Amino acid sequence: MCEATVKNLEKGYREIPMRSYPAVLAFLGYDPHAPPVTLGERLQAIRRSKGWKVRKAAKSIGVDEDTWRLWESGRTPHRMHHGRIQALLRQ
């Protein structure tokens, strides 16, 4: 990242691109976000750690983007998705 980008991030004018999160987390040595409590927060944390956009996260377990977004917003997944979600959480 260039100096101007870093300054804009520090001032809150821009957000860190999702694809940059793995490098940022590796540099920091931890995730500065609050520890995830809910399933939706855990799914968001996984996306951050992998640098995935919703599309890639949803594709990784075979669901559509809207379904993933619903889960991140607090909707309870259907039973048929539990196994795939658990597998992703164990990675």
Image (cartoon, rainbow, N blue to C red):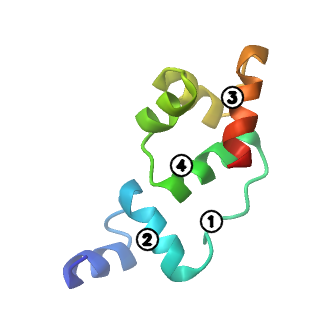
First-in-chain label (1 vs 4): 1
**Label 2: how many Cα within 10 Å (few below 14, some 14–19, many 20+):** few
Name which residue type carries label 4. Answer: Arg
Left or right side of 24 for 42: right
Image vertical order of residue 37 relative to residue 29, above or below:
above
Hey, which quadrant is residue 69 in on the image? top right
Q: Nearer the viewer, mark 1 or mark 2?
A: 2
First-in-chain label (1 vs 2): 2
Name which residue type carries label 3. Answer: Arg
Q: Label 1, label 4: how many angstroms apart (C-alpha)?
A: 13 Å
- Name the residue that disc number 2 marks: 23
**Label 4: how many Cα within 10 Å (few below 14, some 14–19, many 20+):** many
Q: Residue at x 49, y 20 (%)?
A: 64
- Name the residue that disc number 3 marks: 84
Q: Label 1, label 2: how many angstroms apart (C-alpha)?
A: 15 Å
Q: Residue at x 71, y 37 (%)?
A: 87
Image vertical order of residue 52 relative to residue 13, above or below:
above
Residue 57 is situated, as x and y percent measured from the top left of the image, at: 50, 37
First-in-chain label (2 vs 4): 2
Mark 1 element type: loop
- Name the residue that disc number 4 marks: 47
Hey, which quadrant is residue 68 in on the image? top right
